[in-house]
Amino acid sequence: MVKKLYVGNLSYEVDRDKMKDFFSGAGQVVDSVVITDRATGRSKGFGFVEMATEEEASKALEMFNGKDFEGRTIKVDFAKPQQSR
C-alpha cells in the first residue's frame, strides 16, 4: 500500500525532482508534488511525497521531520485525506 506524506515549510526553490531525490534516502518514492499557486505558479511552501510502503513512509518521517532541506527546517507528517469542499 502506498503511503502519502505531507511535507511543509519547503523552500520556494524546491521542485518535485529535488524533493523526490531527498526522500529517496528513505526508500522508493512513487510520486512527489509541490503545491503551487494557480495564478503565479509559485510554490506555496508545501507538498506531498508518496512512498512505496508504509515502512518506508515511517522511516522517511523519522529521518526527515525537523531536518534541514535546502536551508529550511521541514515538517513531515502522514497526510490526512482531502476533505470535500
Image (tube, helix red, strand yellow):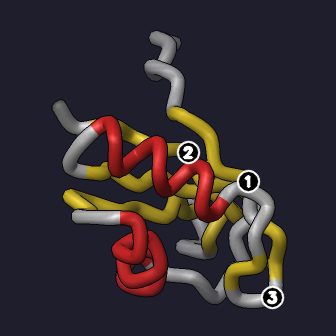
Quarter of the image where one finds residue 45:
bottom right
Q: Which amino acid lies under the numbered mark 1 shown in the image of this protein?
A: Lys
User: Which residue is at a point 60% across and 62% down the rendered structure image?
Assistant: 63
Q: CA distance from mark 2 to mark 1?
A: 8 Å
Q: Is residue 46 left or right of residue 17?
A: right
* C-beta proximity under 8 Å, tags 2 and 1: yes
User: Which residue is at a point 46% across and 21% down the rendered structure image?
Assistant: 82
Quarter of the image where one finds residue 30:
bottom left
Q: Is residue 9 left or right of residue 54?
A: right
Q: Secondary structure at mark 2?
A: strand
Residue ID for mark 3: 71
Q: Secondary structure at mark 1?
A: strand
Q: x%, y% of residue 17?
A: 36, 83
Up/down of 21 relative to 57, above or below:
below
Which of the labelled discs sits on residue 6, or is there none? 2
Q: Secondary structure at mark 3?
A: loop
Residue ID for mark 1: 75
Q: x%, y% of residue 12?
A: 69, 80
Q: Nearer the viewer, residue 60 or 83?
A: 60
Q: Which amino acid lies under the numbered mark 3 shown in the image of this protein?
A: Gly
Which of the labelled discs sits on residue 53, or is there none? none
Screen quadrant of the N terminus:
top left
Q: Residues within 10 Å of mark 2 (few under 14, many from 20)?
A: some
Q: CA distance from mark 3 to mark 2?
A: 18 Å
- Can residue 38 be seen in the rendering of this structure? no
Comes first in the chain, label 3 or label 2: 2
Q: x%, y% of residue 19?
A: 47, 75
Comes first in the chain, label 2 or label 1: 2
